[in-house]
Image (spheres, rainbow, N blue to C red):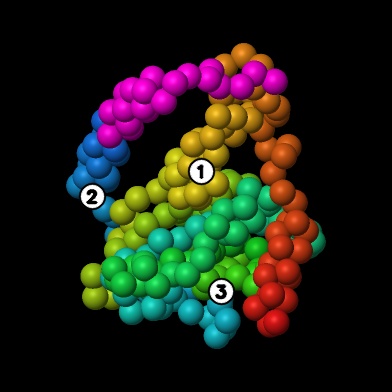
């Protein structure tokens, strides 16, 4: 296995400084992209009825009184014990929501799966973020995440009782919101997937195939609960 080149400390610091300069330039580009995103227009949505822990609820209620709402649309295979590994991966990165709430923003998961199945899946992992089912609504399909359409991230803004859709992304557009990718990109081996450019001799394999199965997350959450319980 090919390892990084071994150098003296002075050369290492010089190389690192060049890398930091490139990263700072990228940070500024990302700031510009975020500014462009904030200047996007928005489109008003009609009322939608979802189903949550308290029964039928509206999209407006999903804001929980806050002005902004981010929804992750979880792919669903009705009746399956293990749902989408990628969506399970994404949801497993969500911890406390208080930092979002401090900025008048709510985060929630929405699925086109039946509420009873969705609620049981959330409970299986001990997730605490709000979940809603759009199985009896056109909401998922109308925001790019209906049956067979895959997953999606959507952003909404509330003005009184009017709801507006301000942003949407899917595919690799969502990967920046899970810290695993960012952390792996810091390492010499990267994501260890064949599509990435790496020096010859570094480990690489097929994408997706190494992703943990839902049962792996379940076991990890169970261990964490046991540790907290003493």
Residue 63 as seen in the image, left or right of residue 111: left
- Mark 3 lies on a secondary structure that is loop
* Marks 3 and 1 in Cβ contact (< 8 Å): no
Q: Is residue 195 visible?
A: yes
Q: Is residue 123 above or below residue 8?
A: below
Q: Secondary structure at mark 2?
A: helix
First in sequence: mark 2 vs mark 1: 2
Camera-nearest residue between 127 and 66: 127
Q: Nearer the viewer, residue 200 or 86?
A: 200
Question: Looking at the image, is mark 2 or mark 3 nearer the viewer?
Answer: 3
Residue occupied by mark 2: 38
The first of marks 2 and 3 along the sequence is 2
Which residue is at 65% across, 73% downward? 126
In this rendering, position of residue 119 left or right of residue 163: right
**Alpha carbons under labels 2 and 3: distance apart:** 29 Å
Q: Is residue 93 above or below residue 160?
A: above
Can you tell which of label 2 and label 1 is closer to the viewer? 1
Q: Position of residue 41 (x, y in %)?
A: 23, 49
Q: Which mark is residue 183?
A: 1
Looking at the picture, how far across and down is residue 32, in whole percent?
22, 39
Magenta region, main secondary structure: helix
Which residue is drawn at the image coordinates 72% and 39% (left, top)?
A: 210
| Camera-side mark, 3 or 1 | 1
Judging depth in this view, the residue of 80 and 85 nearest the camera is 85
Q: Which residues are magenta?
A: 1-24
Residue labelled with disc 3: 128
């Amino acid at each position: 296995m090919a390892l990084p080149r071994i150098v003296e400390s002075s050369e290492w610091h010089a190389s690192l400084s060049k890398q930091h300069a490139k990263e700072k330039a990228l940070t500024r580009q990302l700031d510009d992209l975020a500014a462009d995103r904030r200047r996007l227009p928005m489109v008003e949505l009609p009322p939608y009825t979802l189903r949550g822990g308290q029964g039928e609820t509206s999209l407006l209620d999903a804001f929980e009184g806050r002005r902004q709402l981010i929804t992750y649309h979880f792919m669903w295979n009705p009746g399956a014990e293990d749902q989408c590994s990628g969506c399970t991966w994404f949801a497993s990165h969500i911890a406390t929501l208080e930092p979002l709430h401090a900025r008048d923003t709510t985060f929630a998961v929405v699925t086109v799966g039946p509420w009873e199945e969705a609620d049981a899946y959330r409970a299986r992992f001990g997730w605490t973020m709000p979940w809603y089912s759009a199985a009896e609504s056109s909401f998922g399909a109308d925001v790019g995440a209906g049956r067979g359409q895959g997953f999606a991230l959507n952003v909404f803004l509330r003005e009184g009782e009017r709801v507006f859709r301000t942003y949407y992304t899917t595919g690799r557009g969502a990967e920046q919101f899970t810290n695993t990718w960012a952390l792996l990109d810091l390492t010499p081996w990267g994501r260890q997937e064949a599509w990435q450019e790496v020096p010859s001799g570094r480990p690489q394999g097929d994408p997706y195939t190494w992703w943990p199965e839902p049962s792996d997350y379940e076991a990890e959450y169970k261990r964490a609960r046991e540790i907290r319980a003493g």
